[in-house]
Image (tube, coloured by chain):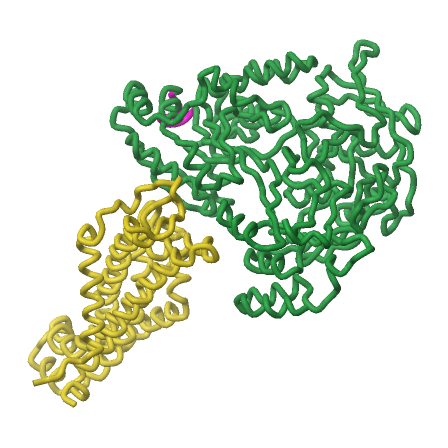
Chain colours: A yellow, B green
Amino acid sequence: MRRLNPLLVIGGLIIAFLVLVALFPTLFTSQDPARQDVAAQLEPPSAEHWLGRDQFGRDIYARLIYGTQVSMVIGVSSVLLGMAVGVPIGMIAGYFRGKTERVIMWIVDVKMAFPGLVLALLFVALFGQSTWNITLAIVIGIIPVFARLAHGPALAFREREFVKSSIVFGARAPWILYKHIWPNLRSEMVVIASMTAAVTIRIEAGLSFLGLGLPPPTATWGGMLRDGTTYLQTDPLFSLVPGLAIFVAALGFNLLGDGLRDALDPRTANS
Amino acid sequence: MKICGVQARMVAPAALVAVLAAAGCGGSGGSGSATNERPTIRWGVATEGITSMDPVRAVQPVDRTLSMMLFDGLVRYQPGNATAPFEPGIAKEIPQAATQDGKQVWTIALRTGVKCPAGQKTPAYDLTSDDVVFSLKRAADPDKSTFASVFTAYDTVEAVDAGTVKVTMKQPVSPAAFLPTISNWQGGLVVCKKAVEAEGEDFGKHPVGPGPFKFESWTPGQRIKLLANDDYYLGKPLSAGWDIRFMPDDTARQAALFGGDLDVAPPTATGDKGLEVIDSRKGFKVVQAPLFGTWYLLFNAKVGPTAKPEVRKALAYAVNRADYVASAGQRTAKPTLSVWGAQLPGGIPDSHVQQAGLAYDFDVAKARQMLAAAGYPNGFDVTVTAPSNVTFFQILQAQMKEIGVNVKIKTVDLPTWQSAIMTGQEPLMLTLISYRPTPQIPYTDFFYGPSAVRGGKHPAQNFGGYDGADALIEKASQSSDSEEQARLWQEINDKILEDAAAKPLFMSYQAYGAVCGFTMGGVEPPTAIPGNWQPSYKATVDARANDC
């Protein structure tokens, strides 16, 4: 029997836990994350408010819990969308070659030159701050990542015998891409998706930190981090806690990605 | 310099460079080393630079402060108490109005011995009526002055002789309206004519005036140095001058203050917490500098649901002042009930507002009931633009939610917010009106129909388009009787509150961290200051005082 990969287990547990928190926040806190009590602002941790209160007297622990939703929803959905768009584009470029490939890869290269956060900032500033816009802003940034990674293998597989024979039998391109090329990319893409989720979560937090995340009073980790910096000297816990949450989530996805790679790669899986 | 090293290791590398550069670590010695010599006061300001030191072009807070240190008025605010009667400045005594040929005339006798110090192009000379006439005419000229509108009631300004100036008015005005125009504030500040003529456009960079301090040097982005004007007519300054350092980085500035490289600086964090850090530090104290301005919730009186006065009143009851005060900090925010509080010249005491039943004390049940009666039993939705640096909008959002008014906040940068409120379409605005020498100015700029930013004849800062007090505001502006004018100002206050054009929230006070021996040289503690910073010639640092 195969021994379970410890990276996979730890990463998987972290992510499973975060998903649970995001889906059922009320299991973890009974407090309303938007409820203010300004007179009690910046109260230190107590039995009632485990991590204290923020500058509006809101419960920091409750905001941390509800902030998980934003991070997970935007982080995960932007990766799934990015993959759904990027992988086909990359496969098409690699499979058809010629002019199609040159145009697609040229666009991808141009886009790769832009840092993801800068592009997302521009997009959100132009189109406004909503869950959909922020997700879209991040998706645009990560499409090229998947396109590039799908392009290489597609190039290699199109020359393989099983693809060539399919063509001889009259198979059409979409069928070949889906039935022959995609299955060979799948495991690698899952690994990349997990690693990219760590990036998208950080981009979302970055946007919120810069004030371009979801509008108040929605709790976001990046927004909490930003609010906390004003009180860094007097209440370090206020910014430390969301910072730690971002760190743990990014670590979870990275570990999961590493673990999946080891588990799915036939060269390491059996060793 | 040991302190420099210790401090430097405690801050991040980027901040470290700033601390070392701006604090002059390893450089010249500070006030601490001076024993018998007069100290130089080292003041860290939270801006990257200034616009101009020329009184008619000084628009930023630090610009204004500098202009008040370098120049002086015919009459003067008592340092630290702007609500006290004016004191004679360059004028021998407080002028009285008289009537000549059917016109109101103010004859001002000048004090002798007032000097214009030497500038980079001009030698020192005795200030005469020539300089005063030149200054007032310059301040009233819209091509040369930002504050020309303050002088619209002026007809002519003439020199009777070398020691007397005569101002003739187009229409009579009250002393409360006239004296601020010749005070040590904005356009009233007297400049040295010869220096202005010699410097031309560069006067704002090389200012010369009869104030307690004289300009020495300006290194953009780094510092401005002032020296004591030992010929100052009220007395020799107690300090040798000022070393004003631009330190926009909060952490670096605070580190420089605690490290002994500054004598006074604004605190890092706002609110009471930031002040506690300074108070708890041995050798340092908090200097309260009243009165930065008044915070209001302004309603749009023309557009949307708030166009109905009943809706505005309902919302006003739903707003809890205490939350804004708590957020800003009890020490730097004091609740205010009147539109123009009694801590300001010509202001209305809260007790009057309370008696008149216009306080709008927080009452959610009443607010809900009134909103339903106004036709919104289920509340309504509005989108409010908010500048990213003002957190009060989130408090407003939470308070409005209680009565069913869903506020969607669109966070933008400050310039975008400013252009948003200039459209006159914003439903709710949280805004600050800073110090003005009389209530007539804020009433006219912010609550007068023709000043409306949307459709006003002379658009100013009336962002909500309110015009319910127009007749009273006009009457008050034409009144030459101080008592009648004061009564009208109170009536305007009541009318604005009655119509719920705005809900006054609190007055904000600026606070600074300083070494124990620092004093601004005025009323201690100061009760009211034009702008937020006004050191007199008696400002100094006592190096021996290290416990407070």
Of A4 and B475, nearer the camera is A4
Quadrant where the N terminus of chain B lies? bottom right
Image position, residue A221 (x, y; %)? 33, 57
User: Is B494 rendered above or below residue A161?
Assistant: above
The answer to whether residue B305 is magenta is yes
Residue projecting furthest to the top: B102
Task: Locate residue A51 relative to residue B64 in the image: left or right.
Answer: left
The answer to whether residue A106 is magenta is no
Image position, residue B89 (x, y; %)? 80, 31
Task: Locate residue B262 relative to residue B505 in the image: left or right.
Answer: right
User: Is B265 rendered above or below residue A97?
Assistant: above
Image position, residue A59 (x, y; %)? 31, 48
Of B223 and B151, nearer the camera is B223
Across the whole image, how many numbered discs are drawn on residues? Answer: 0
Residue projecting furthest to the front: B547
Quarter assignment of residue A22: bottom left
Span highlighted in magenta in the image: B302-308
Quarter assignment of residue A271: bottom left
Task: Locate residue B432 relative to residue B94 in the image: left or right.
Answer: left
User: Is B520 rendered above or below residue A84?
Assistant: above
Does any portion of residue B137 appear in the rendered image?
A: no
Image position, residue B333 (x, y; %)? 51, 37
Residue depicted at x 83% and y 10%: B101
Residue depicted at x 16% and y 79%: A184
Task: Locate residue B422 relative to residue B531 in the image: left or right.
Answer: left
Does any portion of residue A139 appear in the rendered image?
A: yes
Residue projecting furthest to the bottom: A271
Residue depicted at x 80% and y 40%: B211
User: Is B422 rendered above or below residue B478?
Assistant: below
